[in-house]
Image: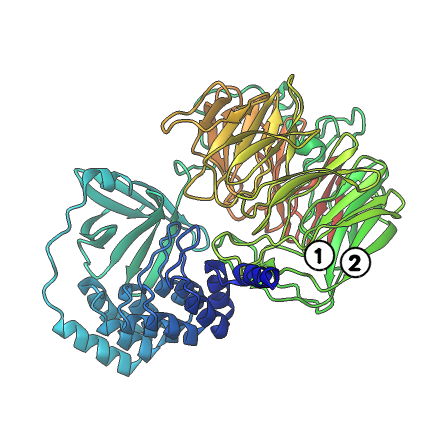
Amino acid sequence: MVSTLLVTLALVQVQAPTPESLWNAARTGDRAAVEAALAAGVPVDAGTRYQQTALMFAAQHGHRDIVELLIARGANVNQRDSFYGFTPLMAAMQDNHAPIAVLLLEHGAEGANMVLGAGIRAKDVALVKAALASPSLDLATIGASVTAAESVGHDEILAMVKEAASKAPPPPAAYDVPAAVMETYAGAYRNEEQSLSATITIRDGKAMLSFNGQPELALKATGEHAFALEVQPTATVAFFGRGGMIEGMSVRGPQGSVTLSRATGAAPAATSAAAAPAPAPDAAIDEPEALTTPAPVTEPRPWPGFRGANASGNADGQGAPVEWDVPAGKHVKWKTDLPGFTNASPLVWGDKVIAITAISSANDRTFKTGNYGDVASVEDMSVHTWRIYALDANTGAILWDTEVYTGEPKVKRHTKSSQANATPVTDGQTIVSVFGSIGLIVAHDMQGNEVWRQDIGAVDSGWFFDAGVQWGHSSSPIIYGDTVITQIDQQKHSYVAAWDLATGRQVWKTMREDEIPTWATPTILKGANGDEVVTNGTKVRGYDAKTGELLWTLGPNSEITVGTPAVADGVAYITGGYPPVRTIYAVKAGSRGDLSMPKGTTSSEAVLWSNNEGTYIPSPIVYRGVLYMFNNNGILTAFNAETGERLMRARVGGGGAFSGSPVAADGRLYFASEDGDVFVVKAGAPYREIAKNPVGEVIMSTPAIANGVIYIRTMSGIVAIAQ
C-alpha cells in the first residue's frame, strides 16, 4: 500500500505542469493546458532563457482567448525578452494579429507609435483607434500620422487622426543623449532590398543623417534612441539593437517607413584598397592575359564532402574553369535535371557525382531568396521521398538512384531551406548521408546498395527564440579514420557522435545539453597532442576525435551559427555573425580547458587572435595564408591568417544574397550568389573581379571542383562547367 502510494506520488511529480508546459500550451493554443499549468502554480510570467513569457507566445501565434486568459491572470503586458527586446505587442504585430494588438493596447501595452503607422497603412480602424487612445503614443507620431492618413485615403481614419493631432499638447523639450551613447549610433546602415544606404555622423555632439550620399540632415533627440529631423519634425529616426550594440535604425516619414541594418565594419566600395599587402596568391595569374586562362590539371583529386576535403574548399591543381555562361551554353559540359530540390552540395569521386534530393508529393516549391529576417516555416508536411543519385561525371547520365525513405517529414523547413540540406560524405567506398528531418543516417556503397542505417530521431533545428518555429537540420557528416562524425544540435539534447563507418555502430557520443540549434559542419584540427573535432555553436568546442572527450570550450559566440570552422597550419578559424556577437576566433591546436578571454582581450596562449568582424551564413576559407570572411550580403573581408591584420574589404559583384560558401582554385576565389551568378575573384589584395558567370538558376549550395570541372547544384539539378 505504501509502495503504491509512493509510486503514485512520483508519477504525479513527474507529470506536474512546468513552465515549459505553459509556454508550449500558449504557443499551440491549448487553453486547458494553460489553465492546468497556472492552477498547478506555474507563474504566469515564468520566463525562458531569454525571458519570453506565455503571453508573448500566445500573442505571436494569434491565440486571442489565451491572451485574454493570461492578462486576466496578471501577465505583464510590457514584459521584454532579453535578446531582441520584444514585447507581447511587438510579437502580435510581427505576425499581423491586429485584434490581439488592440487587446494589449487596451490593457496598457506600450508601443502605440509602431501600431498607429501600421494601422493607418492597413486601413484598420480598430487598430488606429486603440493606438490613438494609448497614453504611450508620442506627439511626433501623432503629427506625422496626419500626412500618412491623408495619403491612404480613408476618411474615418483621417478624421480620427486629425482630431487627435488637434488635441495634442506642445512638444516636449529636446532629450539630452549622453555623449557615449550618441557615439554608438555613428556608422553605415543599409537596406539591400531597396538599395538604400545611410550614414550617421556625430559632429559637435549632434547626430547627422545622410541618405545615399545626399547632404546631411541634423537630428534632434526626442527620447532614448529616438530622433526627429530638425527640418521636418514629423519625420523620425529610431535606433534599435541588443546587448549594448546598435544593429539598425527605422526611419519614418509621411509616406511610410524603412528599416536599415547596421553595416558590418566600414562601408566598402567594390574597389577598396588593401590596408596592408597580402601574401601573393599566385604570381602566375598576375598578368592580365593569364587571369581567365584555367591552370592545367596536375592530378585529379576527389571532392569527398562539404567543400571538399575537411571543408578546406581548396581545388588547386584541378584546372577549375574561369568563364562560362550556362543560359548561352558557353562551356557547359552537361546539365542534368533531378526531381525535388536540396541545399546540399554535390560530391565527386572518380567518375561519379553524388547528389541527394527530397521530393514533395504536393510539389510545394515554396522558396524565398534574398537577405531577410522572416522566421516562418514552410507548412508542406505532405509525403516526401528522399533519394540519392550517382551521375556520370563525364556525361551527366544517371548511373543509379536509390530511394532512402518515403513518408511525411517530421519537422518543417525554412523558406530558404529544403528537406535535404546536409551534404553527404564519402571515402570512395561508402557514402554516408544525414537526413535530419526524418532522423536517419544512411550508408550506401558506391553502387547504391544500402550498407546500414541508424534512426536517430527527428532533428528539430529551429529558431532558438521560439521552439515552435522549425527550419531544418543542415550540419553535414565528416569522415575521420574508420568513423563518421555527426553534429546534432537541436532544441533539446544536442550532441556530437561518431559511428563506425563499416557497420553504423555508435563508437562514442558526447552530449551538448546547453547547446541550441546550429547549422555548422564540424572539422578536424590536427595537432601534436592529438586530432580534435572542432564544432561551432553558442560555445566553440574541441573534442578528442577518437574518444569524443571534451577538450576545450570558448565563448561568447552567436546564438545562430552557420559557418563551418576552417583549419590551416594547426589553427582553427571559427566565426559567428549573428548579432550581437560577431566574433572571429583563431584557436591553436592542443588547447585545453575554458579558453574564454577577459573582456577587452583579443588573444591568449590558446587564441592566436580574435576580433568582432565575424560573418553570417557562408563559411570562412583559409587560402594561401589569408583568411577570407564572406558575409551573406556579399561583403568580403580578408585577414592575414597568422596575425589577424585586415588586408582588404570589398563587395563581391553588386551585392545581393549569398548562402553558398566560397571555394578557391589556382589563385582565384569563387562565390555563388542565390540569384544564380558565380563571381570569380583574384585571391589576395587588392580586390579584383575576374568574371561574373551566369548560371541562370537559384544557387543555395557550394560548388564542387574536380578534374577540370566545376559542378554546381541548382534548384533543378546539376550543371557541369568545363573550359
Name which of mark 2 and mark 1 comes first in the sequence: 2
Residue 167 higher or lower than 684, as above or below? below
Label 1 crowding class (10 Å Cα cut-off): few <14, some 14-19, many 20+?
many
Q: Which of 182 and 575 is in front in this view?
A: 575
Q: Name the residue under label 1.
A: 438
| Colour basis | rainbow
Which residue is nearer to you in this view: 571 or 394? 571
Pointers 2 and 1 in contact (CB under 8 A)? yes
Image spot of residue 282 (x, y percent): 63, 21
On screen, residue 202 above or below 73: above
Q: Which mark is residue 405?
A: 2
| Residue density around tag 2, few if under 14, some if 14–19, many if 20 or more, within 10 Å | some
CA gap, disc 2 to disc 1? 9 Å
Q: Which residue appears at 18% of the width and 74% of the height?
A: 164
Q: Is residue 580 left or right of residue 585?
A: left
Which residue is located at x 77 percent, y 29 percent? 481
Q: Position of residue 723 (x, y in %)?
A: 75, 37
Q: Relative to the observer, which residue lies in front, 547 or 710?
A: 547
Please, what is the three-letter code of the amino acid marked with disc 1? Ile
Name above or below for residue 278 compared with residue 695: above
Q: Point out which mark residue 17 bears.
A: none
Q: Which amino acid does label 2 sit on?
A: Tyr
Percent x, y for residue 20? 49, 59
